[in-house]
Image: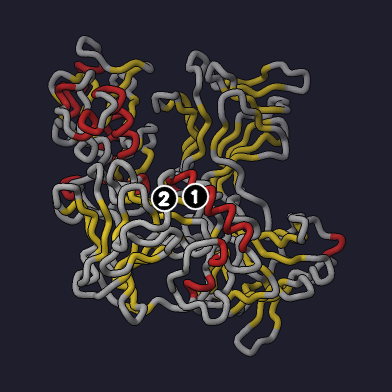
Amino acid sequence: MGRAAGGRPRGGAGRPRRHRRVGRLKRFARRRSRPRGLRTRPAGAALGVARAPGPSSCPSPRGEGVRVRRQAIGAVTVVLVLAGAAPALAGPGEDVLRPGERLAPGQALLAPGGVHTLVVQPDGALGLYALDAPARWSTGRGVAGSTLSTDDSGDVRLVAPDGTLVWSTGTGGSAGTLRVLDDGDVVVTGPDDTVVWSSGTAQPPSTLVGPARLTGDDVLASPDGRHTLLVVPGAGVQLQGPDGSVRWAPQVATAPQPAAATAAPAGAPQPGTPAAAVALELRADGNLVAVDEDGDRVWRSRTAGLGATSLEVDDDGTLVLRDDAGEAVWSSGAPIGPSTLAPGGELAPGASLGSPSGHLGVAVRDGALVATWDGEEVWTSGRVGAALARLQPDGDLVLLDDAGAPVWSAATAGHDGARLVLEEAAVLLVSPRGEVLWQVAVPADRVPVGVPAVGCAQVDGPVPEADTVRTRSGIRVHACLAEAVDAMVEAARADGVVLGGGGWRSTDQQVALRRAHCGPTDHDVYDKPASACSPSTARPGSSRHERGLAIDVTSGGRTVGAGSAAYAWLVEHAGAYGLENLPGEPWHWSVDGS
């Protein structure tokens, strides 16, 4: 089968590239319990040195917690092999697989801190797991009974029972060793600790435990990874959002700052000019201080004496100082609200929804439902005396007054289970099938428009959601197809035909469809011909939906059928917009008819 995707050489996309792993990895050891902070290894603890199995290997003062985590991981992986196995097997509790050692099915490597586990699964795939998360990385489809080994040349190989190579790191000749690190990365390192391959799954911590210092070598990230606090060369300390926009930076105050004791926990620093900060220090007295190259203070949080002991980057895009009890002492500003309102959910005054980047927001204020872009209003329901927004279980979005009477509606009843979703440039009411029932689009002149990096002809495999866009008509497709889809939908509307539909889907979604349509076994999912499924469903990896190059078209909320006016319109006009029909499926249209 040859080498499969699933990891990458550090610093390059296609082949191993040698470089020395800097000391930052040691500082990025991620802790299971809060606060998760930058920590250093105990003096003398070399990177990845093997530990003897047993409770004595648990480092103080976290030994008891690590023992508990080890027991939990044993439950998750089910079949960690007991001591006394064959000499070629890696020892239990190890974080390293040396040349000549192997992992049998069900065996695992355990990161030194006990949070991350690399296990040879019963289905033969190699998977990386954290205690509180699904698989963070996998080699993909496996062969039951496969074993993992590091050969004498340093190549890490997953081999099926019949000797077939299922997957490898491609690091032969490196004399390397496989290691699982506390930051969640899986690496192959040479004899001098040079990293020659990495899974690319390292996670920065979300918390800085004081007293400590954040410099140009360090990064804090929110638990979901979307927000990062770092020192940008030439720009200083910045808290960046998912799109790279600056959500906070220390400012040189242009007016006296209020005393911390009278400031609300969510108060932002005083406006001014960005501070020329090269480091951020959480000092022993609880003050958060930005310093310049000379070590002089250019900004401070004014929280000395208030008990702040940790600095945390939260998933809502805020930077928060907390005391030992977890209470907020200071915050960088307003958080980004959740991006989804579920069926039955309510939005009261003072609460808000936010797009992932935080640019787009929705709130009830001044008696109206209002959508804003960077704080400026882009749409309103009108001042109707609204006190609350509610997404009814039947799919209708309504505004209610103080007496609970409806004063406005999106008129979308009849779609049970619909959700209100904020994407980067639109507010969407989406049915469980993915059809957009109602939307508010941000004016195009407000949203930066990028040029597609590739044309549709160059898209030859599944793409991540990040490579897709939601069109103005509400259909998610690859960026190369978006303009054509919008033009087609607008032309159809001009002819009295209203088109919608579902476009891109993830590989996980394609696998789920195959299990539902083709059968529950791996053979059903990966090998059975599409024509043997009901309805016909492409194999994972081959569907044009996974590439964002296909649409299952709807009209009036129903799947397009062969005798419908919508189908007749598509047959006559869709080709002009680069879409062809898959014979036998009047609803399925793609760039090549497959």
Label 1 sits on residue: 73
Q: Residue placed farthest to the bottom in the image? A: 294
Left or right: 348, with 102 as reference point: right
Residue 436 rendering spot, x and y as whole percentages: 42, 27
| Residue 19 badge | none
Left or right: 560, with 316 as reference point: left
Q: Quadrant of residue 191?
A: bottom left
Determine if residue 69 is in view.
yes
Toward the viewer: 165 or 478? Answer: 165
Label 2 sits on residue: 80
Left or right: 351, with 554 as reference point: right
Q: Earlier in the sequence, mark 2 or mark 1?
A: 1
Q: Residue placed farthest to the front in the image? A: 84
Q: What's the residue at 27%, 17% (across, down)? A: 560
Crowding near pointer 2: few (<14 within 10 Å), some, many (20+)? many
Secondary structure category for the residue under label 2: loop
Residue 555 rendering spot, x and y as whole percentages: 33, 18
Tell me the kind of residue under disc 2. Leu
Q: What's the residue at 76%, 72% (across, down)? A: 287
Secondary structure category for the residue under label 1: helix
Q: What's the residue at 73%, 26% (across, down)? A: 385
